[in-house]
Amino acid sequence: MPAVTPPDLATAPPPDLPPAAGPIPEPPIVVIETVRVEEVPPPAWPPVPPYDSTLPRIAPDGWELMPDEPPQGVLRRLLTTHKHFLGLLNGGLVAHAQYGEQFGRGQGFALLFRLEKLLAWIVRPFLSKQLRDLPFPVQLRRRLEILGPTYIKLGQVLALRQDILPASITEELKNLLDRLPVVTFDRYCALIQADLGRPIGELFSWIDPKPLGSASIAQTHRATTIDGDSVILKVVKPGIRGTLTRDAWLLKGLGVILQKILPRYQPKRVIAEFVEYTRREVDLRREADNAETFAANFADLPGVAFPKIYREHSGGRVLCMEFFSGYKPSDPEALALSESDRDRLIDYGAAAIIRMIYKDGFFHADLHPGNLLVLPGPEGPRLGFIDLGMVGRFDQELRKTLLNYFYSLVMGDAEGAARYLVHVAQEGPGADPAGFRRELTEILARWGRSKNFKDFSLAQLILRSVNMGAQHGLFFPVEMVLMVKALVTFEGVGQILKPGLDVAAVSQSHANKIFLDQFSPMSLGRQFLRGVPDLLEALGRTPGLVMEGAKMIEQMARRAPENPFAGLRGTIFGGFCMVAGAVLASSGTPWYYWSILFAVGLIAGLSRKR
């Protein structure tokens, strides 16, 4: 198939053009005529021809081509998924009989173990020879890879659920493929032109024919805009949207079945979370919105950078963003930085993570060392965040509770941290919140006394606390797990740049600032203004409520028999209402609740019998 770009544009970036020249003085003898750069027309691109699957398809060096075949129908996909599901169950039986231990001691357990051995022997010939002798976590990973992009993405999400799944499974799922098959370069360019609705030559002067990366949903290439900006092009692969929609429907049905078999691992809930996050990732406009939101949130912190989005070069399935020319924190260039520069990068990281989670409630939910870059610059290195398709969100109440939890941790308040974490948890069947709180307090107090950051980091402490909740029937929002992943990544990068880093000490100053900002006059003023509509509504309803309260108290007084303690009873009731109103007011409860209590208490005190 003919290339969609001229050979010189498809193989190397265009050479730098000379800068615009000003008028050249005329020598005494020779007159030199100048040509301005802006008068040189941009290179013309031939139109992208329709994709033809019958033509030879050539894979880039080092890459495997994505199968160019129509997606399976729902029925056929259901049968394929069902086959691998049954294969996984039978493979788990064989693996347990081969690698697992006997259930217990005694004649009954021995008989059960022999029965398992017999069933494993019966089903073994029907399993794939390449999979049946592998441990169960490896079988799970391999079957997810065979089922394709949707299930690979599911496995990557499951690898984060260390609070629910066993460590052996989550560790193995981290090895899922992240270098998946690609589409050909001409198909890639055709996808760009189809989504943007404009000829490529009007937007880009060069696109690298070799992919920079290929994940389960999108494929990325380097490019140069027609204005000379170096960018990254991220394009959703063909058929992915339909495949994800179809597989999501099947997975929801599977989640209902698994919920009855394995309720402890909350499969229905995990699958629902996966479907929601994946649905967001397929629309690249969301990632563009995320990048611009992050940039706005960190406009006052120049040491933290997010890629600029080129909206005129982007669409629903194409994302064009600034190319960050930097290096990973683990690269030799980062380790060669001066100690002051490395300390500055660590401080930037702590400020960014804590602000994302505990101030903005909008954080990078797919943070790992590959999504962090050190960006050199004349004023010192900066920290760049990339791959912003997956974000986590905390509402205001959850954000405040988690800030109090984190603040208690770094301040060494074990009981307070345990109390706030229990408040976040959701109770399952047979939950034991008191036991969880007691055990968690002991762990946090022990960590606070030792603080061995090499073996027991702050992020690992939070992760262990979340994992322990499942043992007591308590479950946490998926955003909690994503938050822990961000903290673990920050700690890991910090330990690379500065071994033995005290993360709690680095984080304390930033946590203190955010914690105290809640009580600043400006913050309190904003909270007051947000409550003004509710206050006005409550004030409008107060006269009617006061009258109703007065009538109710009067009716109660008429029915009550005369006794010497009647006045005392009214005084106590009125005082109780006013104290309760004061407590609610100090705790941030909406105005109309505690104002009504004040009114009722005042009426009760004034209407007591003399």
Image: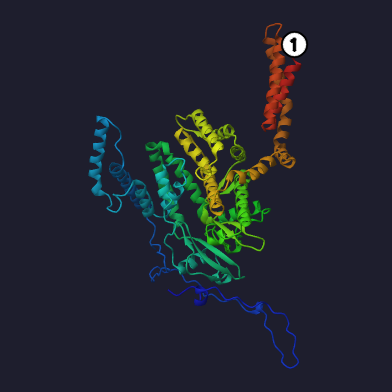
Residue, disc 1: 609
Residue 253 seen anywhere in this rendered image of the structure: no
- The quarter of the picture where the C terminus appears is top right
Between residues 390 and 456, which one lies in front from this camera angle? 456
Q: Is residue 557 left or right of residue 148?
A: right
Q: Position of residue 434 (x, y in %)?
A: 51, 28
Residue in the picture at 53% in, 61% down: 332
Q: Is residue 172 left or right of residue 505?
A: left
Q: Position of residue 274 (x, y in %)?
A: 47, 47
Quick one: SS at disc 1? Answer: loop
Total number of numbered discs in the rendering: 1
Q: Picture quarter containing residue 22?
A: bottom right
* In the image, residue 557 above or below residue 123: above
Tag 1: residue type?
Answer: Lys
* In the image, residue 147 above or below residue 223: above
Q: Picture quarter containing residue 204?
A: bottom right
Between residues 538 and 472, which one lies in front from this camera angle? 472
Q: Position of residue 417 (x, y in %)?
A: 57, 35
Between residues 101 and 392, which one lies in front from this camera angle? 101
Q: Position of residue 264 (x, y in %)?
A: 42, 36
- Label 1: how many Cα within 10 Å (few below 14, some 14–19, many 20+): some
* In the image, residue 563 above or below residue 74: above
- The quarter of the picture where the N terminus appears is bottom left
